[in-house]
Image: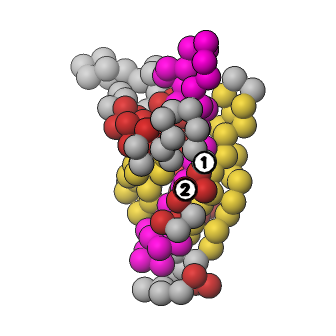
Amino acid sequence: MPTSQQQIETRSGLTYATHDGVALAGDLYLPAGTGPFPALVAAHGGGWQAGARSAFQYWGPYLAARGYALFAISYRLAKKGQKMFPQAVTDVRAAVQFVRGSAGEFKLDPARIGLFGASAGAHLRARGARGRQVQGCLSERCPRRGER
């Protein structure tokens, strides 16, 4: 198992989605080796109004050195006077879809993707995890149970 930062790969500023004209990006920290590796999508804290994906600049290398990929994301922040729910939750779900869809390119296991968050990011992670999920579907257009 890798133990030094030289043995991990960092891909900064990967655009994972564009919503409402806003390009959303993340920083991907990858373990060395052949994979496939489990992955975590990380959402930063900041009261839904502030914060940055760089909050995970130490967690990413730490986890990657231990065999876990981390995708630290930016999401749309709340702005006074604008309806912002559920935009940030949608952004978290889009990041999961990006990781799942890019699993082959980045040596990730699409069946082992988790969510990780701090403060407001933990709230978004919980809301994102409660989305409708039918055979990996995280879209609002997914069928409900019994509608398959």
- Position of the N terminus, as image quadrant, is bottom left
Identify the residue at horizontal 61%, vertical 32% (top origin): 76
Contact (CB < 8 A) between labels 1 and 2? yes
- Give me the residue at 48% from left, 35% from top: 47
In the rendering, which numbered label is found on residue 55? Answer: 2
**Residue 107 can be seen in this image:** no
Magenta stretch contains residue 64: yes
In terms of secondary structure, what is the magenta stretch mainly?
Answer: loop
Q: Position of residue 122 (x, y in %)?
A: 38, 43
Looking at the image, which residue sits at the far left?
146
Front residue of this view, candidates 84 and 91:
84
Quarter of the image for residue 105 reads bottom right
Separation of residues labelled 1 and 2 (CA atoms)? 6 Å
* Amino acid at dot 2: Ala
Point out residue 13 in the picture as x, y percentages from the top left corner.
71, 54
Q: Position of residue 64 (x, y in %)?
A: 49, 72
143 or 45: nearer the viewer: 45
Is 141 covered by the magenta stretch? Answer: no
Amino acid of disc 1: Ala
Q: Which mark is residue 64?
A: none
Q: Which residue is mark 1?
A: 52
User: What segment is highlighted magenta in the picture?
Assistant: 61-88
Judged from the image, the secondary structure of the residue bearing numbered disc 2 is helix
10 Å neighbourhood of mark 1: few (<14), some, or many (≥20)?
some
What residue do we see at 69% from left, 23% from top?
20
